[in-house]
Image (tube, rainbow, N blue to C red):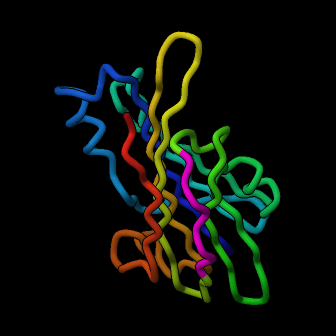
Amino acid sequence: MIAIQCIETWWTKASRGEPGASARAASPDALTLPPATGSGEVTLHRVVLDERAGFEARSSVVVMSLQETQRRLGGLVLHAGLDVLDVMFTWSPYTVGAPERRNGQAIRLHGGSWCRILHNGRMSDEQEWSYQQTVFNIALHPSTPALFLDSEPLRIDDHRAALR
């Protein structure tokens, strides 16, 4: 079983200064994994903190195939093998936003290990800029629901850039 925790924080320029900046900066890097039911290779725990909702966390848990997971999670490439998982960050202006940056190197996870990938981006619609920061905590065969809180990742791959 693969467990992915995706924590997304979304804001506009209204939260670049106080008091919004403190609220968005309080977004967690990890949480306890909630229980999940269903069949599939991946348990996805998605948490969204949005300026429009006062940065209140909205959480969902779904179990799905590896292919469906990759369709839902922009910026992440997963290759599963026999008791091994290769994880890599990939930049795209459509899923991650500006500015452009290099793709990451593959991180190889073995059973019980986990990694953290961080990225951020700036996107535009016709009215204003929006900004996002995403934290992916990815584990292969997680040992406990508190794995992301109680242990250190095998590697942290930080792809955050300065957002103007």
Residue 104 in picture, x, y percent from top left: 58, 68
**Residue at position x 82%, y 59% in the image:** 67
Above or below, 84 against 156 in this view is below
Q: Is residue 144 magenta?
A: no
Residue 87 in picture, x, y percent from top left: 64, 72
Left or right of residue 76, residue 142 in this image: left
Q: Quadrant of residue 20?
A: top left
**Residue at position x 46%, y 38% in the image:** 132
- The quarter in which the C terminus is drawn is top left
Magenta span: 100-107
Q: Quadrant of residue 146?
A: bottom left
Q: Is residue 102 magenta?
A: yes
Left or right of residue 90, residue 17 in this image: left
Front residue of 163/153: it is 163
Above or below, 79 against 163 in this view is below
Q: How many marks?
A: 0
**Residue at position x 57%, y 60% in the image:** 102
Single out the residue that lies furthest toward the top: 127
Residue 77 in picture, x, y percent from top left: 70, 64
- The quarter in which the N terminus is drawn is bottom right
**Residue at position x 71%, y 68% in the image:** 78
Residue 117 in picture, x, y percent from top left: 50, 64
Above or below, 160 against 108 in this view is above
